[in-house]
Amino acid sequence: MNEDQQQPKLMSHAEVLSRGAGSAPFLVPGLVSADLTGVIGEPYAGKSSLVVNLVNGALTTGDFLGRRFTRRPERAVLVCTDAGLADEYARRLEELAGPGSDFGSVIYAERAPRSPDGWEGFAQKARIGSGTLVVVDNLSGVVDTNNAQEVRPFLAAVVDVCVTARRAPVVVVAHSSAKPGFNGRKAKGPMGLTSISGAFRLELRVAAGSGGALTVETKGNQIREPERLCLTRGSAGAGDLHVTSSEPLSESAARRQTKTLDQRADMARFVVEQCQGLSKADAAAALARTFGGSSGTHAKRLQPSQPLGQQLVHQDGSWALASV
C-alpha cells in the first residue's frame, strides 16, 4: 500500500449523511445494529439457533424475538467457516419456517474472504447491498482471535466493504471461552483480544440454560439500557425461540444479588440451628444435602474470608451468628 492510499479520506457533513450515517442505528431495536453486531457465547450455547431465528424473521415473519425490523432485509448471505455449517443452517431454516417456505434469497459461502480486496470481490459476486443481511459464523474459523494483526484488519474490511460502502448490516458470531478462570467463572466476552468486543456496535451474549432454554444479554454503545432476555425453545426446530421475559440488566443483576443475599442468610441460620457440635467439614456436608452443590464448595464458603463465613463464628464446635 503506497503513501497516498494510507492518507485519511476527507468527507463533508453532507457526504457522510448521504452514505447512511443519519439512518436508524438499529436493524431490530435494541437487539441488532444496522452496522456490526456480535453474537457471542460458548460453543453449543445456542448462537446459531439465534441466527436462524434472525434470518427467518428477516425474510419471512418480519420480527426477531418479538420486535419488528426497522427495515426488512430482502436477502441474506451466510458466510459459514465450519464444515457442514451451511447444511445445518439450511436444514434449520426449513424446519423453522415449515413446508412451502422459500429461502431462495439466501446465499451460502463456505469460506470467508479475509482482505479488503477479497471482501470487495465477494460483495460484488454475492450482490451485497443495503437490502442484504450478512452473517459470518464464526470469527475463529477465519482468523486467530488472539492475534490483533489478523482480527482488526478482518473486521475493518467487513465493515468498510459491507456496512460503510453498501449499508448492509453484518452479524458476526464469536466464541467466548469455555474454560473457567481461577475463580471458577467463565468470561462472557469474545474469546481472544478485548479489541474484538470493542469492534461491535452491539453484542448479544448468549448462554445456555436448563431444558434447552437460553439467556441473551445485550451490550453496546448504541443502547441506553442493556437487557436480559430469557428464551425457551418451541417445537419447530432449534431456531424456534420465544421470549418468556425481558428486563433491564441492572434490575436482573439486582434481583440476583438480592436472591444471593437471601440464600446466604438462610444458610447462616441453618448452620446455627442445625449444625451445632459439627465440624466445618460436617457442616459443609449438611449444607450440600439441604441447599445442593458440593461439600467442597460449601467448605470454601464457610472460610472466614468468604461472605458466608463472615456471618458465622465457629468455636469449639459451637456455631453462632457474627455480630454486625
Image (cartoon, helix red, strand yellow):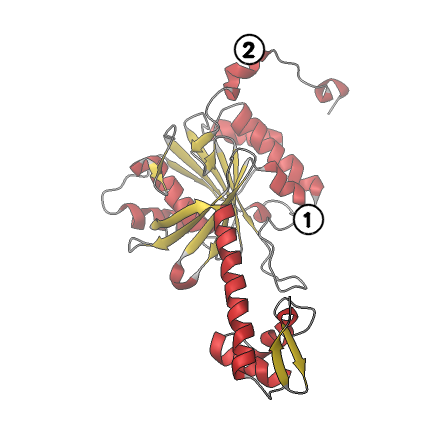
Q: Quadrant of the C terminus?
A: bottom right
Residue 158 higher or lower than 164, as above or below: below
- Residue 208 place in picture, x, y as percent: 46, 58
The amino acid at mark 1 is Asn
Q: What is the number of the mark on residue 125? A: none
The one nearer the camera, 31 or 103, is 31
Residue occupying the far left of the picture: 100
Tell me which corner region of the image, top left, top right, bottom left or bottom right, holds residue 55.
top left
Q: Earlier in the sequence, mark 2 or mark 1?
A: 2
Is residue 48 something that shows in the picture?
A: yes
The one nearer the camera, 120 or 254, is 254
Which residue, given by chain and number where applicable, does mark 1 sit on? 146
- Residue 272 place in picture, x, y as percent: 56, 79
Residue 244 higher or lower than 56, as above or below: below
Residue at 48% x, 31% y is 169
Q: Secondary structure at mark 1?
A: loop
The amino acid at mark 2 is Ala
Q: Quadrant of the N terminus?
A: top right
Quick check: 310 left or right of 42?
right
The one nearer the camera, 302 or 185, is 302
How packed mark 1 is, by other alpha carbons closer than 10 Å (few <14, some 14-19, many 20 or more), is: some
Residue at 52% x, 29% y is 162
Alpha-carbon span between mark 2 and mark 1: 38 Å
Is residue 43 something that shows in the picture?
A: no
How packed mark 2 is, by other alpha carbons closer than 10 Å (few <14, some 14-19, many 20 or more), is: few
Residue 294 higher or lower than 10, as above or below: below
Residue 110 higher or lower than 309, as above or below: above
Which residue, given by chain and number where applicable, does mark 2 sit on? 14
Quick check: 262 left or right of 100?
right
Q: Nearer the viewer, mark 2 or mark 1?
A: 2
